[in-house]
Image: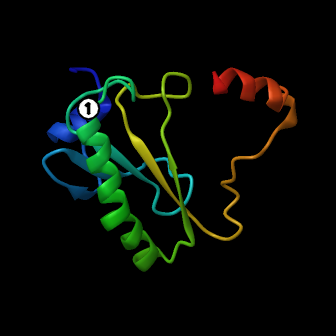
Amino acid sequence: MNDCIFCKIIKGELPSKTIYEDDLIKVIMNINPATNGHLLVLPKEHYINIMDIKEEIINHSFKVIRDKLYPQLKEKLNCEGLTIANNNELGQEIKHFHIHLIPRYQNDNADFQYNKDNITDLDEIFAKLKK
C-alpha cells in the first residue's frame, strides 16, 4: 500500500529503530510507547487485520516473540512480564496488521482495567459465545 506508514517503514522509506528482522517480519520500537521497550511486530506483506493475514505469518511471529523477543526483553530490560496485544478495526490506528509487545514492570500503570460499566451480564455473553 502506497500510503501505509508501516509499509513505508518496512521498505526503508521512513526511519525506524529496528530490533529484529527476517524475511517475514520486522520488529520496531514503538515511537509512542506504553512502557519502556514497547515493540511492534510488523509482517512485511501488507495485511489489514487478523482476518486476512496468512497463518504462517502469525505462527512465525509468535515463535519469534516466544523464542527471541520476550527473552531479550527480560534479559536486557529486566521486565517482569509481557502484554501481547493486537487491535482489529476499532482501535486500530494504522490499518496494517501488527502485534504490540508491551513489557510489564511493577507499578507501570499500563493495566487493562476492569470497568463494570462496560460489561454486560457474563451469563448472557457466555451463552452467545458458546453457540
**Figure quadrant of residue 58:** top left
Q: Is residue 43 left or right of residue 89?
A: left
Residue found 41% across the figure and 43% down from its top: 99
Please state the total of marks drawn on the protein image.
1
Asked if residue 57 is positioned above or below residue 79 in the image, the reply reads above
Q: Residue furthest front?
A: 131
Which quarter shows the N terminus? top left
Residue found 41% across the figure and 77% down from its top: 76
Q: Percent from the top left, x then y, of residue 12? A: 16, 42
Residue 106 visible, this angle: yes
Asked if residue 124 is positioned above or below residue 59 in the image, the reply reads above
Residue found 21% across the figure and 20% down from its top: 2
Between 12 and 87, the one lying in front of the other is 87
Q: Is residue 89 left or right of residue 106?
A: left
> SS for tag 1?
loop
Between 34 and 113, the one lying in front of the other is 113
The amino acid at mark 1 is Lys
**Figure quadrant of residue 64:** bottom left
Q: Which residue is mark 1?
A: 54
**Figure quadrant of residue 105:** bottom right
Asked if residue 26 is positioned above or below residue 123 in the image, the reply reads below
Q: Percent from the top left, x then y, of residue 44? A: 20, 38
**Tell me, what colour scheme is on the image?**
rainbow
Q: Percent from the top left, x then y, of residue 19? A: 28, 60
Residue found 55% across the figure and 28% down from its top: 91
Asked if residue 12 is positioned above or below residue 67 in the image, the reply reads above
Q: Percent from the top left, x then y, of residue 107? A: 71, 67
- Label 1 crowd bin: few (<14), some (14–19), many (20+), radius 10 Å: few
Residue 43 visible, this angle: no
Which quarter shows the C terminus? top right
